[in-house]
Image: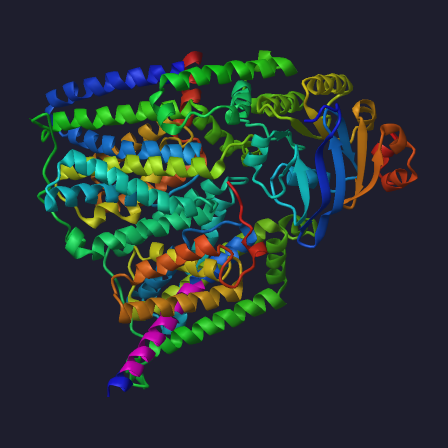
Amino acid sequence: MEKSNSKILFALIIFLALFPVVVLNVRAIGHYLDVMIFVGIYSLINLGLSLLMGYAGQISLGHAAFFGLGAYSSGILCTKLSLSPWLAMVAGVCLTALVAYIVGVPSLKLKGHYLAMATLGFGVIVYIFFNEEVALTGGPSGFSDIPGLTIFGLDLNNDLYYYILVWSLVLLTLVFSLNVINSRIGRALRSLHDSEVAANAMGVETSRFKVIIFVLSGAYASIAGSLYTHYVGFLSPSSFDLFLSIKLVMMVVVGGMHNIWGALLGTWLLTFLGNEWLHVFRDFDILVYGAVLLAIVMFLPEGLVGLTPKMRWLWKRS
Amino acid sequence: MERISLIGQLTQYLFTGITVGSIYALVAVGFNIIYNVTEIINFAQGEFVMLGGLIMVFFTAVAKLPLPVAFILTIAAVTGVGALMERFTINPLKNATVLTMIIVTIAVSILFKGIAMFVWGKDPYIIPPFSGSEPIFILGAAIQTQTIWVLLITAVVVVLLTLFFKKTRYGKAMLACADDPEAARLVGIRVNIMVLISFALSAAIGAVAGAIITPISLMEYDRGALLALKGFGAAVMGGLGSFYGAVVAGIFLGIIESLCAGFVSSGYKDAVALLLLLLVLYIRPSGLFGNVEASKIKEF
Amino acid sequence: MGSENFSTFLSVVDLRKSFGGVQALNGLSFTVESGTIKAVIGPNGAGKTTLFNVISGVFPPNTGSIAFDGESIEGKKAGEIARLGVSRTFQNVEVFGRMTVLENVMVGRHIQSRAGIISAGLKLPRMRREERQIREGARDYLKFVGLEHKAGELAGNLPLGEQKLLEIARALATEPKMLLLDEPAGGLNTRETEGLAALIHRILERGITVVLVEHDMNLVMDISDEIVVMNFGEKIAEGKPKEIKNDPVVIEAYLGEEVDYSDL
């Protein structure tokens, strides 16, 4: 891992360790822990999306579907078949990876707009499936009473424990992703982004790597879905709709899509904005989201992390 | 009895399909006009339809303007929206990557959706049909008069667009841009202006679609995305960029969807249309009638 | 390869490729002997770059065959052809601009390494070892072209001449048997071109066969063992530099192309 990455990772771990200590002692923001769990869940998806968009150069407007597949797999297997939640999570990952593979192979042959529309279409189809297969999914009203997670007999049905669980998984996924980025696979992906024709001439298997990353990002989203299910305890299709797919892409873009730290920053910011700081806008969050996204793409194409070199420059000058 | 009612049903579904399909066709044509000039797929295309419907509601039900006046004002308003969108979001972004353009048009579509929710709220709106609410009976099927209006106006739009592209200076210039933007620039066509016109024109077509369908299917703030997706499906099926391909494919998609809703499952009708889109993308991305040359697509 | 020093290494037979109505390659045939330098010249639009693109698998030919080192490669994908030992550079440099110079060459080592996503993500010891080898190998190739002092810079920030050298280092890193150079001297000054000629000879000494498309006639005449002259997608002449210089057909084809005519 590169030095700068280790430093940021270290800072992140310190922040994550201090966060609950501060938050749980200040009453007014005690519920921030709950928001931070959602930040972690969405971060897990967006780590994959960032690999896909920022490194493999492929867009997906259907990642809510993978999130949903993970969530419903866990929900259904745990309640209807009484499977162990951890086994259900693994089963969900396998199922989602399989679906991602089946969809990814033909989809990733498409480029640009075609790929965007294909993934969008896929996302909506899965959403319709969640709505219509009432016997399996409970239809539009969904189903509840999904058990929480336990580990070695320890009940994780507690915000602090769940926070630790979610963010440990995020950190593991983050390190895994950073390792991939700094390996021959990461280089191959970045090279594809700069010049596909040259990358091909170097023997980089374009289509294979795109599919691998697509499947990996699907697997991340599936784990996130399982964690979501066991945390909130109920499921309905509206949590996995088209707007979520778009919001996920937005988080990555707002943070900075060519940088994995950007994905985390964007997720953190937009989740807090959406769940907490924009409550005044409640129903009109779409309007705010649209405006923020538009402003970022137009004026800050590198996302918020694109600001850091400028800030550093200002810092040095003062 | 049984047979007649089956024919009646079939007729009913066919008409419904052609009506909805006309709207898909108009959305698809809107996609194509912008794509031909700019190679951008405008993800906000569906929002033009939504805005067309809701602004029509405002002019007829709230401002109580006579129908033709409301219709024309609606088109003018949405055309303005399209032109503004181009000036403020597309025009400033020179040399943007396809990924950026996708995200920009998505951002605009979310913004439009947000504005519509802000202005009109979340409830669907309806306006009375353009003339008489008594249905016409054909082969035992009850056909709403608005259906006739939809078909008629769609046909008029197709004819007008054909004339525009074949006969007018601007229309020909736009076709030239589609063929070869560099060459068009060299012969003195102002590509910049053509891009503006393409957005304005697409918005106008979207507005027409929204205004004529609202009496049948109602309109609400979040209808844009699905309309865009299906319109895109029609555009791809017809061969992206192909004008008549889009019209035929749009109506075809509408009929398939309507038959599926009638005979199989109404819940899955959208899924079937989208599945069809995916299959076409996977198997014949050049479209059902297109050739491979026409499917040249911009890369990231 | 046989016991002979020179044997047919690449043979192109009746290659045709058209785009829309334009016939970019129109029944082109020629051969390249192993361990030689062959130049492909011709006026702009003669189909030279198309030839390279077809050989290296950017797109397949319409008809015709290409045999490389005893294996038929026409229509194979770029990656497969790279694995068989053909590497190339590009006329309009295609370096990976947002990656460092060293990383560019490390991408060149791609087919010589094999770590998968799991071992890369978990940083298994096997993968660490391989990563170290990739890095050291890449440094060697940078040294070979004289760019080791730029290893940490972003490739996009290098001047054109160095980007061209970087492309050569990257191509060499794949350990090719044959190297296709597409206008390596384009945009270089005289001194840089001289350095390039020396570099190409050193590449040859490593046992790598070189085929180049080039407009700089001094360079071509200086270093090539044989020259193919193309016009309108066809071969109009082939032979040693001396023969080509005096070929009336070639001179006629170049009439009007002032830049190169003076050099002939």
Quadrant holding the C terminus of chain A = top left
Seen at 44% across and 61% down, the residue is B234
Q: Is residue C252 above or below residue B115?
A: above
A186 left or right of C187?
left
The answer to whether any part of residue B208 appears in the image is no
Q: Nearer the viewer, residue C90 or B106?
A: C90
**Numbered disc total:** 0
To which quarter of the image does residue A77 belong?
top left
Percent of width and height locating residue A227: 19, 35
Tell me if residue C197 is in the magenta stretch. Answer: no
Tell me if residue B22 is in the magenta stretch. Answer: yes
Q: Is residue A53 above or below residue B165?
A: above
Percent of width and height locating residue C112: 52, 24
Percent of width and height locating residue C239: 84, 33
Instruction: State how the image is colored.
Output: rainbow
Seen at 42% across and 22% down, the residue is A182
Q: Is residue B74 above or below residue B159?
A: above
Q: Nearer the viewer, residue B125 or C194?
A: C194
Percent of width and height locating residue C84: 59, 31
Seen at 32% across and 28% down, the residue is A265
Quadrant holding the N terminus of chain A = top left
A211 left or right of C155?
left
**Residue lying at the far bottom of the rendered structure:** B1
Q: Which residues are magenta?
A: B6-26
Secondary structure mostly seen in magenta is helix
**Residue lying at the far front of the rendered structure:** C3
Q: Is residue B260 above or below residue C146?
A: below
To which quarter of the image does residue C202 belong?
top right
The answer to whether any part of residue A15 appears in the image is yes
